[in-house]
Image (spheres, grey):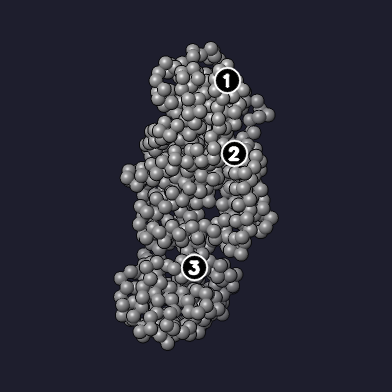
Amino acid sequence: MASTLPLTGDMVLVLLVLGLTVALFVWEVVRVDIAAIGIMVVIGLLGLVPSDQLFNGFASNAVISLIAVMIMGAGLDRTGVMNQVTTWILKLAAQSASRVVALTSASAGLVSSMTQNAGVTALFMPVVGRVSGRMHIPMPQLLMPMGFGAMVGGTITMVGSSPLILLNDLMEASNRSLPPGAEALDGFNLFAVTPIGLALLAASLAYFWLFAQKLLPTGETKGSSAPGRTETYFADVYGIEGEVYEMLVTVDSPLVGMRISEAERLPGAPLLLGIQSTDEPRLAPPADEMVWVGTVLGVMGTREQVGQFALANQLKLQPRLKTFGQLFNPTRAGISEVVIPPGSRLIGQSIGDSKLRSRFGISVLAINRQGDIIREDLRAQVLQAGDCLVSHSTWSDLAELADDKDFIVATDIPKEEQRPQKVIHALIFFGLALVLVIFTDIRLSIALLTGAIGMILSGVLSMDEAYQSVSWKTVFLMASLIPLGYAMEVTGTAAWLAAQIIAVLGTMPGWVLQVALAVLATLFTLVMSNVGATVLLVPIAINLAIVTGGSPAVYALVVALAASNAFILPTHPVNALIMGPGGYRVRDFVRIGGGMSVLYLVVSLTVVNLIF
């Protein structure tokens, strides 16, 4: 097994570039995407990759597939599909942060079993954002467990990750070059690796539950807050604090027959933000709206205040937001500041007379008048020029208000339009993409782009919205690193490295060889594509197994599984996706991903040898 490959000058250059890449990523001298682009330029200047092929990464199957799944994820999110997932997770979590982490990670992992994990991560990121906003759990505490769950979920079936998709083709190709007398290799069926993938997913959940959760950053990330998540600001400035709750009006409640304006004046009344009687639930109930038996009120206040009000007025406090869950979602509604400008026609009118709720859909919670905060008897307050109204409304109503010259909206509001009427279109094209991926031989990027372009043509997303949904930092990071993997292959550097390691371990026991192959595949996939690592190492693993009397299929499977063990650096698409929104640094991936990588190797090697 001794190596016959000489170490050439190009190999030395590639090894130096490889070391520079790792150093830039570990010490974060510059942003990782800038580092990746710089490495690509260096490879071109050194001539390690032909200049006409240097930028092929931008048109690669992996990069185009990633763009497509980001667009489809945005389409599903825009139609409200992921809102339902959020509601389901919150319902089962029952205010438990640990349970939220487990549910989001497990859900992402199971969905990843049938589609690419980078796409699943893009799909679940809005879910994590909403859960973070609703339960006040910092995004860094949720994103990495979810991302790692999506990565290991790709090992549950043979179509969940690119290395496993390639494995059967590589084994079939190896059959044509087997030595005389060697038994032909049979491919793995769709669910052959399911026990391995489920064991890895369970191990990932246990890892974060018992240990890694303590190592995750606990602070909020700049710009990561969801719309409307400014409770601290409004609590500090205006004294508006608490959560949103639902209360059911019982037959014995004194509120029965009252108007909303009368209920608001009751002692200890919380802020009444929503109502549902016989029709659909809505925000900003008009002052003359009547309260009847069975009416559900959406309120805001501290738990103590809401509890005391419910007890005093025979109201049933609901354990969760069943009626107003969607309306109170931070992506749909929130608190804002609206200024009354000079010349507004509302100047001189009281808030009650101006009917802000029925006309504009906003509930006034407080007034900031030249630094004085007014929160009592708001309906009688006469509006003056310069008054800053603290209001609660849907973002769509607030956007319409911004076009009215009688108001100046001082809050940055999301402009995204929700399109629940397009949910069927989104699901059809997402399902079509999955069918093409799973049941046809169509190239992955083409199959996924079919779903993405279908969503655009059917009006789920506009083309501009599709462009905005793509994380171009991630695209450039991936595309710029592909030439490094190509340089390692075409110069023979990867084969030389593999041969050196295997030459040393060739006489070792079978389990040592499997560990060596798994570690080698892990190292390669950190600095090059997992597809490249798989293509390079599977033939070597099969030949090594034949020479040493091991099982070629098992050795090949070990390599394909280890090629998904990319938790340590943000070079994997999933890690690159969550790095920015989660505010993670490379050292976070090294610290937490290092333990996950060791656990991944131990669990995967153990279960592979128990099953096969």
Q: Secondary structure at mark 3?
A: loop
What is the CA distance from the residue labelled 1 to the residue labelled 2? 30 Å
Residue to which mark 1 is pinned: 178
What is the CA distance from the residue labelled 2 to the residue labelled 3? 37 Å
Residue to which mark 3 is pinned: 327
- Residue drawn 54% across the image and 14% down it: 5
Q: Earlier in the sequence, mark 2 or mark 3?
A: 2
The answer to the question of whether label 1 and label 2 lie on touching residues, with beta carbons closer than 8 A, is: no
- Vertical order, 293 against 528 (above or below): below
Mark 1 neighbour class, 10 Å CA radius: few under 14, some 14 to 19, many 20 or more = some
Q: Nearer the viewer, mark 1 or mark 3?
A: 1
Task: Give the quadrant of residue 377.
Answer: bottom left
- Vertical order, 499 against 336 (above or below): above
- Residue 441, horizontal then vertical, whole percent: 65, 39
Residue to which mark 2 is pinned: 62
Q: Earlier in the sequence, mark 1 or mark 3?
A: 1
- Residue 25, horizontal then vertical, whole percent: 47, 34
The answer to the question of whether label 2 and label 3 lie on touching residues, with beta carbons closer than 8 A, is: no
